[in-house]
Image (cartoon, grey):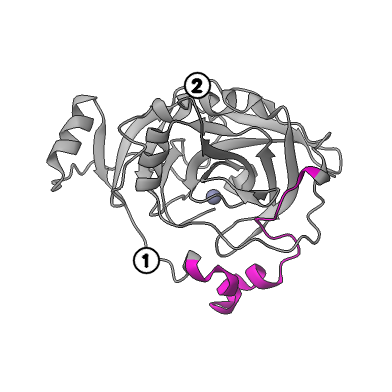
Amino acid sequence: MFFKGLALTSALGLSTVLACPDHDYHSQLKTQGLRIHKRQQGAPPNWTYDASIDWGRLSEDYSLCQTGTHQSPIPLTVNQGLSLRHNPIFNNYDMEAQGTFYNWGYGPAMTYAHPEGDYSALPSFTFEEEDGHNETVHLSGWHIHAPADHSVQGDKAKAELHLVHAGEEGHYRSVLAIRIDPGNVESTFLSNMPELISYRHTEERVNTTSNPRLALDEVSHFNQFWTYKGSLTSPPCTEGVRWYMARNIMFASDDQMQQLLNASHFSSRAEQQVWRHQINV
Ligand SMILES: [Zn+2]
């Protein structure tokens, strides 16, 4: 689910305009008023999705990937029912939030801009945790996996959108997951950025805006969902993440799906054993 490029810090402020061999594509983006920047990258990760069953052996820092009691993703089924608790109450999701769009190395992604350490102006939702206290989390960005991380009834969707939310002090705290599959309609969320969804460049980022409400609209604002206590789905597999999986699916046209897959690499962690996940509890 997470990766080196999804730091919970503002990525705006970079100003290097790139010379890139893909002039036509970048000209096209620039005529839309989009600015292209060099992306700051750290060292490449020492793990791969191809070998996700052995992440725990790569580093002591990744031991939770092997020993954790509520690791993600897990298989979801209709037999588990749907949640009657922890309903997300959306506060200010309907906004053209500013940020930077890029390819996280596995697919399209966006990080929303905010002042250092201050997430308060970002879209947010509030939910009741199991001990009864209400918690508000803020949308720090989103990214897309292909194929999906989670299966439902044994089936994996072609892709899965993760809307990543930060809790206090910027910790990853909750993820809204939406399955994406081909259907008979275009996805409005995806069509809102037609030039970007097929963006394959991993070393550049584009300043733009996107309205996350468009994603919620396509899954009835999570009126039906599974929820459980899980983890990051990439090293270090940190736990303490409340997951929501929408029952509804975001449908994309064949063309959108093909563009999306063309910009994606395999990024689905092996499913984990259900243990202390408290599914829908
Ligand atoms: Zn993810």
Q: Residue 10: image x %, image y %?
A: 42, 41
Residue beneath the point at 47% across and 41% down: 116
Against 48, is 240 above or below?
above
Mark 2 CB lies closer than 8 A to ligand 1: no
Mark 1 Cβ inside 8 Å of ligand 1: no
Image-quadrant location for residue 259: top left
Distance CA(mark 1)–CA(mark 2): 34 Å
Q: Residue at (32%, 34%) from the top-left corner?
A: 207
Q: Is residue 240 visible?
A: no
Judged from the image, the secondary structure of the residue bearing numbered disc 1 is loop
Marker disc for residue 113: none
Q: Splitting the image into 4 quarters, where does residue 134 fall?
A: top right
**Picture coordinates of residue 180, whole percent (x, y):** 53, 38
Nearest the eye: 259 or 53: 259
Specify whether residue 18 is painted magenta.
no
- Looking at the rendered structure, the kind of residue marked 2 is Met
Q: Is residue 167 left or right of residue 190?
A: right
Query: Residue 217, position in %: x, y?
Result: 58, 23
The quarter of the picture where residue 273 lies is bottom right
Place of residue 146 in the rendered image (x, y in percent of width and height, measured from the top left): 48, 50
First in residue order: circle 1 vs circle 2: 1
Q: Which residue is mark 2?
A: 95
Q: Which residue is mark 1?
A: 43
Residue 217, compared with residue 181, is above or below; it is above
Above or below, 202 against 11 in this view is: below
Depth check: give the residue in front, 274 or 249: 249
For residue 108, side relative to residue 58 (left or right):
left
Part of the protein shown in magenta: 50-78
